[in-house]
Amino acid sequence: MDKRILITGGAGFLGSHLCELFLEKGYEVICIDNLITGNLNNISHLFGQERFKFIKHDVTNFIYVEGKLDYILHFASPASPIDYLNFPIQTLKVGSLGTHKALGLAKEKNATFLLASTSEIYGDPLVNPQSEEYWGNVNPVGPRGVYDEAKRFAEAMTMAYHRYHGVDTRIVRIFNTYGPRMRPFDGRVVPTFINQVLDGEDLTVFGDGLQTRSFCYVKDLIEGIYSLLLSKEINPVNIGNPEERTVIDFARLILELMNSDRKVIFKPLPVDDPKVRRPDITRAREILGWNPAIGIEEGLMATIEYFRRMREK
């Protein structure tokens, strides 16, 4: 295979797993990341491979890549609440300017473009589960608006390049994903709970803990993304695990799996924190033949083991 793929944000949690996947499938992989939230440790094991190249670059600036490109996956963006609250301007810029630059490169190279969008475009949804036809309930001026609106703009820009310039595009709406290479203190539920147990602390739950989330293991997610890329579907597709559970039940599951006797403590709910989050994956099932295969306990045990190993290094 002589396919060549560019992955922006390739040193991040999801991007690094995608770099691995495409290398395993015989692609030549170019990884671009400015390392604001990405980490070279995520891809260090790929250095030295003939078909892998890393470029440190901010994709809000002009992107130059010599030679052909068959695919561009745009995954560059802060993606956790702590990150996009710490880097609000960078988050808005990578969703707007970065998407524009990546789409311009796709147009120049006649490459298929896949945008990493998010369930956050649904905001604090008034329907559950959320299907791709739902337009969302987003506060554009709230603290989470920098991420929500950046991704909504990115989707609009992607569809504009498809309709006006004829660029072959895909949009994946990613729901809560977990697994190895998450950053320990990025503020998301899974690494926070695991590391609180490892530190001998009580688990922090915001609000009453009855808000729901749906957790998809990273291996399932990237296989869904791969299937979407190779499909002909231009409309947004939800990829996530539709098994919904409350945050308090999830906290108790972590304590059980880690044999911990720590307690759960409650803190005020952050502004605009979604009360429900569950993907309707009918489109993914019907068009891609995709379903998540890894159960929550299996995925969590692999993730727990990853964070334990990180502490031994």
Image (tube, grey):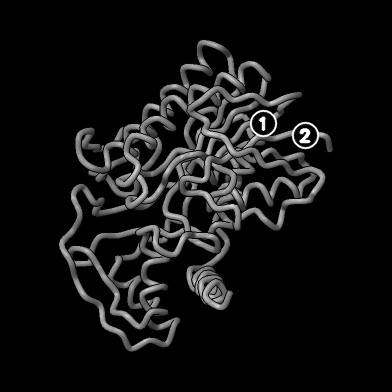
Return the x and y of residue 273 as percentages of the image width and height.
24, 51
- Tag 1 secondary structure: strand
Q: How many marks?
A: 2
Q: Can residue 78 be seen in this view?
A: yes
Q: Where is residue 213 in the image (x, y as percent from the top left)?
A: 34, 58
Q: Nearer the viewer, residue 9 or 262?
A: 9
Q: Mark 1 points at which residue?
A: 71
Q: Residue at x 40, y 30 (%)?
A: 93
- Residue 131 picture location, percent across and down: 38, 41
Above or below, comparing residue 118 to residue 188 in the picture:
above
Choose between 87 and 202: the one closer to the eye.
Answer: 87
Q: Are marks 1 and 2 in contact (CB under 8 Å)?
A: yes
Label located before the other in sequence (1 or 2):
2
Badge 1 local density, few (<14 within 10 Å), some, or many (20+)?
Answer: many
- Which numbered marker is on residue 3? 2
Q: Position of residue 81 (x, y in %)?
A: 33, 50
Q: Which residue is at a point 37% across and 49% down the rendered structure image?
A: 83
Query: Which residue type does callout 2 highlight?
Result: Lys
Q: In which quarter of the image is residue 298?
A: bottom right
- Quarter assignment of residue 22: top right
Residue at figure coordinates x 29%, y 75% from the top left? 203
Which image quadrant: the N terminus? top right
Q: Dot 2: what SS? A: loop
Residue at 28% x, 53% y: name it: 276
Residue at the limit of the structure toward the top, as seen here: 164
Alpha carbons under labels 1 and 2: distance apart: 8 Å
Q: Three-letter amino acid code at disc 1?
A: Tyr
Q: Above or below — where is 201 with respect to 119?
A: below
Q: In which quarter of the image is the C terminus?
A: bottom right
- Residue 298 appears anywhere in the view: no
Q: Nearer the viewer, residue 157 or 56?
A: 56
Which residue occupies the extreme left position in the image?
268
